[in-house]
Image: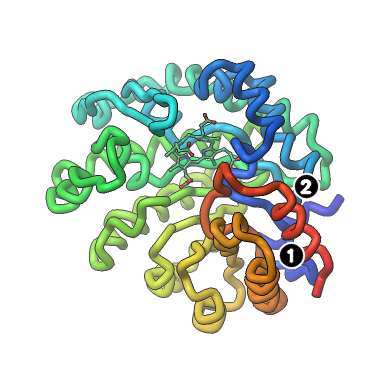
Amino acid sequence: MQNRLLKTLKGHIFTIPPLWMMRQAGRYLPEYRAVREQAGSFWNLCFNPELACEVTLQPIRRFDYDAAIIFSDILVIPKAMGQTVDFAPNHGPLLGELNHEQIHSFCNWSDFDAQLMPVYEAIKLTRNALDPSKDLIGFAGSPWTIATYMIDGGKGHEFSQSRQVLRSVEVLAPLLQSLTCAITRHLVNQVRAGATAVQVFDSWAALVPAELREQVLFAPLREIVTQVRQQMGDVPIIYFGRGIAESYLELAPQDLNIALGVDQHANLEELDRILPPKIPLQGNLDPEILIHGGEELEIAVQKILNIANNRPFVFNLGHGILPQTPISHVEKVCKLVRRGS
Ligand code: CP3
């Protein structure tokens, strides 16, 4: 058994780093589009354990990645807490009105578990079908990132109401607290079902000004990490704080024993220089360069590989793979990474 991702997240340095790609199951794959069509809607796909398992395995079959990430979405949490979440074609998520009171006082955890059971079933099926040498990643959004969708309803990428709420702690704090509980529970449930590592996606972390990041991002993260480990032991956890690499300097000394995901705009060399060498890093190939391909792609991959030799490192993208990505470019990256130079 290899479990190269797990070993790396626990501090091992491989000559050839483990490789997976954020949003690796998705529309760039024709076999995904076929199953997605069969399912009829995005939610039908997410909540059908057999189909979710199938699309989780597709990228492993094609690219032999070191880890599968369970096919689901960060927005299953507001949905399971009673807020409507729809995916309109070609629009992205659209959420119904947020009822703060209902979320703050949410305590119907047996219903929450029941609604999310298909996700846990999909994890069980995938764990059984997946080669034991491969790791299976469970995930959730961070409290703040989920809150931005709940507050702004998924409309536009300005998140204007979320920015406003940053000024009213009395509104934001109970929402983050309630989401912290829900996220912890969802992660624990995923580990119980067979996920061997978990990632917390904080895709909208950069909306929070630096001086508020401890309170809005890192304190809730600390609580999630502590609670998950208290309940499930030493589970490897990856935190992907998109656009806030400069604040990793503040997070690193907290010794949370977590890996840090790095986006494509961060300076990986500098982070490697300044962050403690025991902290595993993950990233950070630019998804646009992956689309572009050519020599630029080769250079970008090599630049990341140079750092991968110095510390525990997981090769990944700096953000999710885009639908228009040519499959041949993904194959090229796999080849370059596995060449081991
Ligand atoms: O392969 C995997 O990585 C697992 C599946 C996965 C999805 N979403 C499937 C999905 C994961 C890990 C996510 C995380 C997610 N979802 C994030 C964090 C990562 C990031 O990209 O920043 C966010 C912000 C969401 C919310 C979300 N879901 C948005 C904004 C959208 C619409 C945009 C888009 O990419 O279409 C989704 C829909 C979604 N989630 C799709 C997929 C494959 C596309 C819908 C479809 O196939 O019809």
- Give the label on residue 63, or none: 2
Q: Where does label 1 land, which residue?
A: 17
Residue 242: image x %, image y %?
43, 58
Name the residue at the right extreme.
1
Quadrant location of residue 15? bottom right
In this figure, which colouring scheme has been used for the structure? rainbow
Residue 95: image x %, image y %?
31, 27
Q: Along the polypeptide, which appears first: circle 2 or circle 1? A: 1
Residue type at mark 1: give it: Pro
Residue at (49, 56) in percent of width and height: 240
Residue 29: image x %, image y %?
67, 37
Nearest to the observer: residue 194 or residue 234 = 194
Residue 309: image x %, image y %?
72, 76
Q: Name above or below for residue 312 compared with residue 35.
A: below
Residue 214 seen in the current view: yes
Residue type at mark 2: give it: Phe
Q: Is residue 43 left or right of residue 197?
A: left
Task: Determine the CA span between mark 2 and mark 1.
Answer: 15 Å
